[in-house]
């Protein structure tokens, strides 16, 4: 047969058809990414949460025998400057609480006089009050949990000791929590 230069009906230029399929596929992938990005991005922590990922605190603001409550990641954190009598008592008691822990396991070496704990009762998340209770530490009035001056549970329904967050001393007078 002689070539007439006419492509039979139903058959297009194969290169052109492949380009259209590839371009349509690329456009669909791009559109899918544009739709998915906001949905995935909204799962990232908010800017105010990231700002509170760690916080520094000046320990000179706490007098011996007092505690300061600071907010970290939306939770209260107790920073307590313990007296020599409190220290002596929690050290001689040894490993108590649940799980049993010594005071040295709950503080940093060289800074034993300071205790840093998350101020939420491990029973139902209430905020315990300092200076009440039977063991010279905290008392949760909601359900009657008693903690000692090391934040260890001693009596009541709370299943665990007060949580010690990750923290480090950046100097002798500054602590970084988180």
Image (tube, rainbow, N blue to C red):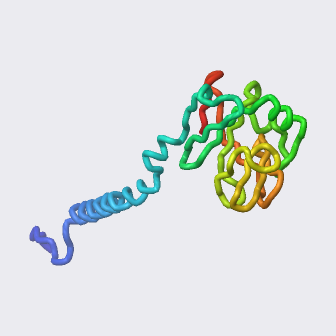
Q: Residue furthest front?
A: 132
- Identify the residue at horizontal 61%, vertical 25% (top origin): 60
Looking at the rendering, which quadrant does residue 37 occupy?
bottom left
Looking at the rendering, which quadrant does residue 90 occupy?
top right
- Identify the residue at horizontal 65%, vertical 31% (top origin): 168
- Residue 153 position, x and y percent, is 79, 51
In the image, 81 versus 51, the foreground residue is 81
- Identify the residue at horizontal 66%, vertical 42% (top origin): 165
In the displayed structure image, the side of residue 9 where residue 18 appears, left or right: right
In the displayed structure image, the side of residue 106 where residue 176 appears, left or right: left
- Residue 11 position, x and y percent, is 20, 73
Please identify the quadrant where the N terminus is shown. Answer: bottom left
Please identify the quadrant where the C terminus is shown. Answer: top right
- Residue 98 position, x and y percent, is 82, 52
In the image, 167 versus 42, the foreground residue is 167
In the image, 160 versus 85, the foreground residue is 85
- Above or below — where is 90 with respect to 59? below
In the displayed structure image, the side of residue 126 where residue 147 appears, left or right: right
Q: Residue furthest bottom?
A: 9
Looking at the rendering, which quadrant does residue 27 occupy?
bottom left
- Identify the residue at horizontal 65%, vertical 22% (top origin): 172
Question: How many numbered marks are there?
Answer: 0
In the image, 74 versus 84, the foreground residue is 84
- Residue 56 position, x and y percent, is 56, 32
- Above or below — where is 165 with respect to 56? below
């Amino acid at each position: 047969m002689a070539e007439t230069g006419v492509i039979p009906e139903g058959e297009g230029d194969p290169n052109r058809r492949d380009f259209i399929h590839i371009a349509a596929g690329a456009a669909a992938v791009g559109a899918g990414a544009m739709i998915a990005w906001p949905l995935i991005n909204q799962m990232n922590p908010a800017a105010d949460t990231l700002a509170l990922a760690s916080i520094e605190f000046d320990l000179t603001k706490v007098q011996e025998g007092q505690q300061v409550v600071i907010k970290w990641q939306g939770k209260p954190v107790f920073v307590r400057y313990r007296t020599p009598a409190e220290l002596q008592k929690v050290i001689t008691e040894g490993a108590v609480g649940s799980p049993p822990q010594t005071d040295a396991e709950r503080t940093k070496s060289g800074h034993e006089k300071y205790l840093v704990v998350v101020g939420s009762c491990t029973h139902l998340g209430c905020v315990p009050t300092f200076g009440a209770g039977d063991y010279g530490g905290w008392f949760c009035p909601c359900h009657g949990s008693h903690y000692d001056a090391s934040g260890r549970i001693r009596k009541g329904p709370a299943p665990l000791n007060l949580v010690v967050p990750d923290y480090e001393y950046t100097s002798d007078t500054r602590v970084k929590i988180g």
